[in-house]
Amino acid sequence: MQRYFVDKDSIVRKIWGKADVQLFIFAGAAADFALNKAVDWLYFTGRLPADPLGRLFSTVAYARRIIFSDEDAALAAIDQITAIHKAVEKNRGAQIPDWAYRDVLFLLIDYSIRSFELLDRELTGPERTEVFTVFYRVGCRMQLAGLPASYPEWLSMRYDHLQKNLVSSKFTVDLYRQYKKHLGNFRYAILKQVQFRLVPARVNKLLGLKNKYWLTPLLGFYKFSRSLKLEGVLRTALLPPAYKAQIRELDVD
């Protein structure tokens, strides 16, 4: 019998099987990346500032390979991620800090939960623990140091990381400039409003995000559009046309 890294009936598959939830996850990640004290590592390769949306879809592809593949393929994908980071470290002649690796893992847990709850429903305690457990296993495979052993411990460490590892810097300003350049004014405004509703208070404060109030009715209309099967049309309108194919591929039947 074929084994999967993530069980077929797992809430994690339901979360990551929805294109809109995935896009919200990376709206949150875009905020955290811009503030992270180790963001210079993303600038070292040049990929993130040169093509932030392409980087988003590349990251999505890896996450989907892990979540929806059989166990062997998922482990191979995790190992490939590890190898890519090791190569970057070798080229730079330095090591990515352990806390920076944990931060990325932590934000994937956090925004998986926050995005699904914003767009769909509140998760149960066991479901939140299940989200944590899946990404904890990813971290273990990557041999990351200092991982929390439980969901409550993760909550405490996530809060601590938010206080210690985020700062508004020249990279923050430049990265948001790139977001605006690649998205355009309208889509950029939506990105910031989604982030306002989605991100933790610490992130919100550092970015100075402000509530424009129009996102609430827009979200309500978007949720209604799901019942009419029109959400794909709206998603396509919210991202540049060059990414239509990638957007269509995000939904899992």
Image (cartoon, helix red, strand yellow):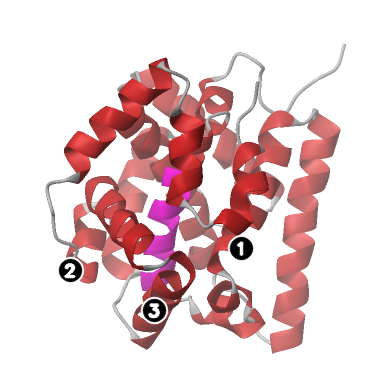
Question: Image point 58% across, 28% down: which residue?
Answer: 17
- The image shows residue 153 at horizontal and vertical percentages of 37, 41
- Relative to 224, residue 216 above or below: below
From the image, tell me which residue sits under label 3. Answer: 177
Q: Nearer the viewer, residue 135 or 242?
A: 242
Give the spatial CA distance, label 1 vs label 2. 24 Å
Q: Which mark is residue 55?
A: 1
From the image, tell me which residue sits under label 2. Answer: 208
Q: Within 10 Å of the Cα at label 1, are there few (<14), some (14-19), or many (20+) other Cα atoms?
A: some
Question: Image point 34% across, 18% down: which residue?
Answer: 124
Q: Nearer the viewer, residue 251 or 123?
A: 251
- The image shows residue 252 at horizontal and vertical percentages of 64, 26
Look at the magenta stretch and give its main secondary structure: helix
Return the disc, 1 or 2, that comes first in the chain's sequence.
Answer: 1
Residue type beneath disc 1: Arg
Q: Is residue 76 left or right of residue 13?
A: right
Q: Nearer the viewer, residue 157 or 131?
A: 131
